[in-house]
Amino acid sequence: MNMIIKRDKYLDELIGWKHTDLIKIVTGLRRCGKSFLLFNLFHQHLLSSGTDESHIIEIALDDISNEALREPFRMLEYVKSKIKDDNQYYLIIDEVQLLGRFVDVLNSFMHIDNVDIYVIGSNSRFLSKDVATEFRGRGIEIHIYPLSFAELYQARGGDKYALWKSYYTYGGLPYLASLNDNARKAEYLSSLNQTLYLKDIVERNKIANEDEFSELMNLMASSIGSPCNPNKIANTFKSVKKVSLAPQTIAKYLSFMEDAFIVEKSVRYDIKGRKYISTLSKYYFQDVGLRNALLNFRQVEETHLMENVIYNELRRCGYSVDVGMIEVRSATQRKQLEVDFVANKGDKRYYIQSAFALADEQKREQELASLKKINDSFKKIIITRDDIAPYHDDNGVLIIGLMDFLLRDYKDQLI
């Protein structure tokens, strides 16, 4: 089944930055839909806006037929040969990191007044360490996540809870939407992990011991949402895997996983002290299907995966997301309470708990404990798997069901 899944959020971002004097840099996990967004959805937008086909210059550098264009001067010559008049042109380059001296080449293109530049990259290193430094504010990043649950539901419809089970099991890579057979979905994800993501990271970063790195990926997959740091992980390797791996090596490997957009790091934040605590962090997978495939679908625990999906939804909406901590002291003891997510964007802040079920008053009070200790005026939310109508409790905390949260109608608003 072939279907066109709209990515309106990202298309609107591209349109919003159109004709600005900035390079539009589209990043994201491999196979998450970056090329389709530019070469199909944005291309169609340009045509419907009156742009002539000859004024859209599209180059996929991972296509072997374009290998010659990876050489910087050939690329410059080719693009300039396509510009025949003073009307607006749109240059779209996929896998731009394959272009030799791409920073210099893109700088050269910026000197052409009637060329609007869009580039796609599949790792953050070229963005954060090259583009951000070299372009000094002349580039804007648009980061694409795999399909959200809402995007998938809009395309497929049907029983939302059946779709939710499929979503937290197989994730949101767009190609999977065309597959109805679960065995084929699992095979596709496992193949991607081995032949694309693992191979890409190992080769790009010249990792000598592929088995060690693979074991670390599996370990991180089995502990999503658990506080950790390189020292703690090193101890786990020693006790569980019977392998000695230096904390410095683990920190480096984790940075490689972040660069490839496999995982994201969420740092602990002391809410009362208003400071970051770097001793422990949490890691979440940008696609839960890839996470499950790493473990051969042996640990598909809905409660942890729901937390991961909520994290991804917050990030997709443009929020920075920290793990909140509140220290509570009494005459006899001192303990730390956790807030799953502290979400910030501009002047907005939300404190959010992911609660699989609020089965009784004891469980409700457990989830409320940390939120009740926060004495500022920012909004507090508990998201539960329960199918309930949203309501505010006596403490002013919004209790909302997962489906209502994920399928809310208003753009990028949490409540």
Image: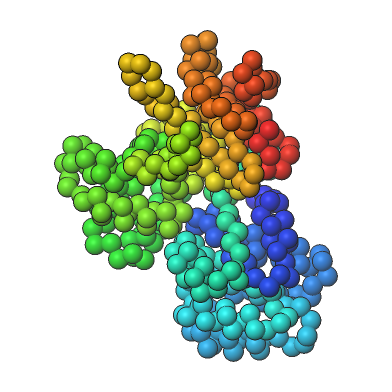
Q: Compared with residue 155, is residue 302 higher up or lower down, i.e. above or below?
A: above
Q: Compared with residue 123, is residue 307 higher up or lower down, i.e. above or below?
A: above
Name the residue at 37% across, 60% down: 201
Q: Position of residue 376 (x, y in %)?
A: 59, 30
- Residue extending furthest top? 361
Name the residue at 48% across, 39% down: 274
**Screen quadrant of the C terminus:** top right
Q: Compared with residue 37, is residue 184 higher up or lower down, i.e. above or below?
A: above
Q: Quadrant of residue 406 in the image?
A: top right
Q: Is residue 398 left or right of residue 353?
A: right
Q: Position of residue 211 (x, y in %)?
A: 25, 52
Q: Position of residue 5 (x, y in %)?
A: 67, 49
Q: Position of residue 137 (x, y in %)?
A: 59, 69
Answer whether residue 162 is visible to the viewer in this image.
Answer: no
Q: Nearer the viewer, residue 41 or 269?
A: 269
Answer whether residue 91 is visible to the viewer in this image.
Answer: yes
Name the residue at 82% across, 66% down: 49
Q: Is residue 263 left or right of residue 141?
A: left
Say how the picture is coloured. Answer: rainbow
Name the residue at 20% across, 49% down: 245
- Residue extending furthest right? 50
Q: Is residue 398 left or right of residue 98?
A: right
Q: Compared with residue 343, is residue 335 higher up or lower down, i.e. above or below?
A: above
Number of numbered labels in the structure image = 0
Q: Quadrant of residue 294 in the image?
A: top left
